[in-house]
Image (cartoon, helix red, strand yellow):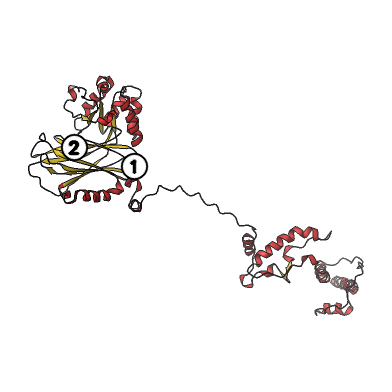
Amino acid sequence: MDIVKILIVIILTVVMVGIAWAFLRRRRSKTVFLEELTGVPPRPQEDKPDTKPAVLPPAPMPISAPQQSERTKKAEKEEEQSVPPPPARRAPAPPPAASRPQEISEYLSSYRERAPQEESPGQPPEPDAEVSWGGATAEEMVEPDAGFNESDTLDDEIRFGTAEPQPVIKPAPAPAAPPRSAATNTELSRGDPKTLLAVHFSAYYPREVRPMDWQPLKVYLFRRFMADKVAEDAQAQLGERLPGFRKAMQVAAQPVAEGAMVTATPDLPGFQFNPPSMTVGFYKDMHRFDFELRATDAAPLNQATNGTITFTVEGVIVGDVPLSVFVGETADAPAMSSAETRLYQAIFCSYSHDDTTIVERVERAYKALGLDYLRDVMTLKAGQDWSAELLNLIEQADIFQLFWSQTAAASQHVRYEWEHALKIAPGREKFIRPVYWEQPMPAAPSELSHIHFTYQPDLAK
């Protein structure tokens, strides 16, 4: 059986060789055919290729798979050598190496668009990789030292496949802050801007004075980052007398709106002040109030007298700077001392709703100061409802400011409020702060006779 199989294979091989020889003999000379069989490269053909239609040989006998594969490869190779590439596929001379990847991408894109019109009917388009450029394929255009792999091809598509660069979307610029001076920017860079922009009050006043001797009183309204400028200005204003002065400063816990009208009113029993009060619009980072003070004959001799400089916004007390001046026949010049207090955050305003001017002032003060506590007081009092919530607000207040007038003296609601304030006043220094603007002052009840009422004529405006 093995001999029979071998004979069959030999016979099939001989038949295949004969059919192939007959098929190739019509296209080439016997010499070229023998050279190809022996492995010698074929010589260039001088004669024109045979233009006669090829005659298909008779169907071959069944052959084995390896033989069929070898035959197919030879036939495809011969067909590629015999059929010249179409002229439309020839590309121009290659561009410089630096721009070649982009040019290749553009050429391949244009080739894909026109390939269906240039291809002959029935002939499938060849892959883009076979398109040559000056005798080299697209893969051969890659620089030798760069290597070639699939990831490089993907990178090239990402880098060179996009015709136009994608626009870069930039975020909208933030609105510019209001311009400040170079000195201001330097100060703000040293700490928290919220703290440095807070409003402060300070006062420079003499520690000891002689009776009937006028002395300067310098009061400042400023933002925290201007503290050094305030000290420099006080030095320039007082000069050699500065060591004999005290410095008192009040730390503002709430901001004061720009443009708010701030009034400073000094009050010291037995003393005169010129002017009695001053008002400025808070438009700059630092304002100075220039006062003068002197001890009258009513001031106690050889002892200290205590008082305050009260700051109000639209008539509402927002803070006090303490004063303590010793009255003596001989005034020394001791070293300057300082004191610091805080701004009032919880202010209970007690007033009659018939005093329209005062109600409007309190509303403006709330807007200028932005105190939530003051807003709560306004909200509860707007309904003219005396309730437990108002009692709680009085107990939580830093000061109880009583706007005293003829209508307030006759108001039962106002009486309820100051009576409750008297109950909780013990232990709270200067808790009840009555102010009036009518002359003569409306008569105060005996329960409030021990409390000083401050005259503020500007409240009537």
* Residue at the spot of label 1: 283
Q: Amino acid at mark 1?
A: Tyr
Q: Quadrant of residue 301?
A: top left
Q: Nearer the viewer, residue 7 or 363?
A: 363
425 vs 93: above or below: above
* Residue at the spot of label 2: 273
Q: Indicate the position of residue 188 as horizontal and vertical percent values.
A: 34, 51
Q: Amino acid at mark 2?
A: Phe
Q: Indicate the position of residue 240 as horizontal and vertical percent values.
A: 16, 51
Q: Nearer the viewer, residue 148 or 459?
A: 459
Contact check, label 2 and label 1, Cβ < 8 Å = no
Query: Element at badge 2?
Result: strand
Q: Quadrant of residue 146?
A: bottom right
Q: Nearer the viewer, residue 280 or 254?
A: 280
Q: Is residue 271 visible?
A: yes
Q: Indicate the position of residue 289 as horizontal and vertical percent values.
A: 25, 42
Disc 2 and disc 1: Cα gap in Å? 25 Å
Q: Is residue 193 left or right of residue 161?
A: left
Q: Indicate the position of residue 174 as horizontal and vertical percent values.
A: 46, 48
Q: Is residue 292 left or right of residue 18?
A: left
Q: Quadrant of residue 34?
A: bottom right
Decide which of tag 2 and tag 1 comes sooner along the chain.
2
Residue at the spot 15% in from the left edge and 36% down from the top edge: 271
